[in-house]
Image (cartoon, rainbow, N blue to C red):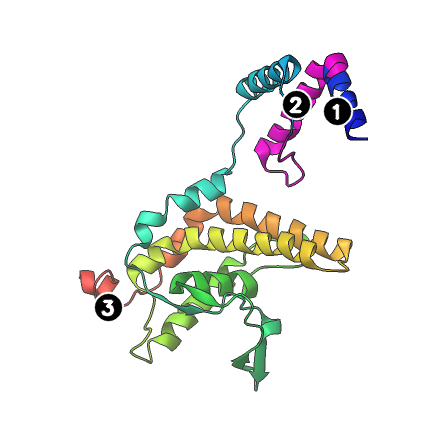
Amino acid sequence: MQQGVLARHKCALAQRGPQIAEGFAASVTLGSGQFCTKPGLLFLIDGPQADDFIATVTAQMASATPGALLNAAIERGLTLAPELEGLPRCPTFCDYHPGNLKWRDERGVGLFDFDWAKLDYRVFDVAIGIVYFCTSWEGEDDGELRLGKADIFLRAYQDEVSRTAAPGPLTAAELAVLPRMLAIAALYVVSWDIVAYYIDRDPNDDEYLYFLEHNVAFVDFIESHLDELAAMAAGVEAAAGPGGARGEE
């Protein structure tokens, strides 16, 4: 049987070698090579036909049009890295939406669901909160950030945390990166849509599609309103100390 398999292998390469090689190369490079179903290992029997096959694949790979692995939003997020140096890091919850909060007398008094909790930048946690609490989920403005509500949220946060020494209000440096951090938070939620769908044993396709369409629209909204978000952040009083507005006076 093994000899029969080898014979068919040689016959296939002899009859359709270039076509198989082109199909293999196209499958590997599909979607800039990001498809999880792309071929991994390829075993060939040593010989002239294998050499021709490798040469064809090599030529096809070399002539393939390079694709962008990062879209513009992700690329801009990566350029933010130098501005994050020295910003406060702390344990973060990273999943602040109303369904994960325990409410009493219209006040949040507890948290549920710590699956996303991690050590991260404090301003990222604030951005996640703004994403969940200040985004419209209905009507013509579905997928848009309610800027007035976001401004109220941010000012209320500053007022509340100013009552304690730690962590204290957001600094001017944190407020400066907040617009881009909101864009990163939006992408973070889109990643949840995709990952959660594939790990769900019995996903509701319509429900996940609704989540995905909403959050992709939100990413687009943030990217097209960065100037307005920057103006909002600049209007919020920053904390005193190094990098803070009062510390710069």
Residue 158 part of the magenta-drawn span: no
Q: Position of residue 247 (x, y in %)?
A: 19, 64
Q: Looking at the picture, does residue 177 appear above or below residue 100?
A: above
Picture quadrant where residue 52 is located: top right
| Number of other residues with Cα within 10 Å of mark 2, as a class: few under 14, some 14 to 19, many 20 or more | few
In the picture of the structure, the residue carrying the numbered disc 2 is 45
| Number of other residues with Cα within 10 Å of mark 1, as a class: few under 14, some 14 to 19, many 20 or more | few
Q: Earlier in the sequence, mark 1 or mark 2?
A: 1
Q: Looking at the picture, does residue 160 appear above or below residue 212?
A: below
Q: Amino acid at mark 1?
A: Leu
In the picture of the structure, the residue carrying the numbered disc 3 is 240
In this picture, which residue range is highlighted in magenta? 14-42
Residue 57 in sight: yes
**Point 66% across, 29% down: residue:** 27
Give the SS element for disc 3: loop
Q: Amino acid at mark 3?
A: Ala
Per the rendering, the mark at residue 6 is: 1
**Point 76% across, 19% down: residue:** 12
Give the Cα separation between the discs numbered 2 and 3.
Answer: 70 Å
Q: Main secondary structure of the magenta part?
A: helix
Give the SS element for disc 2: loop
Q: Amino acid at mark 2?
A: Ile
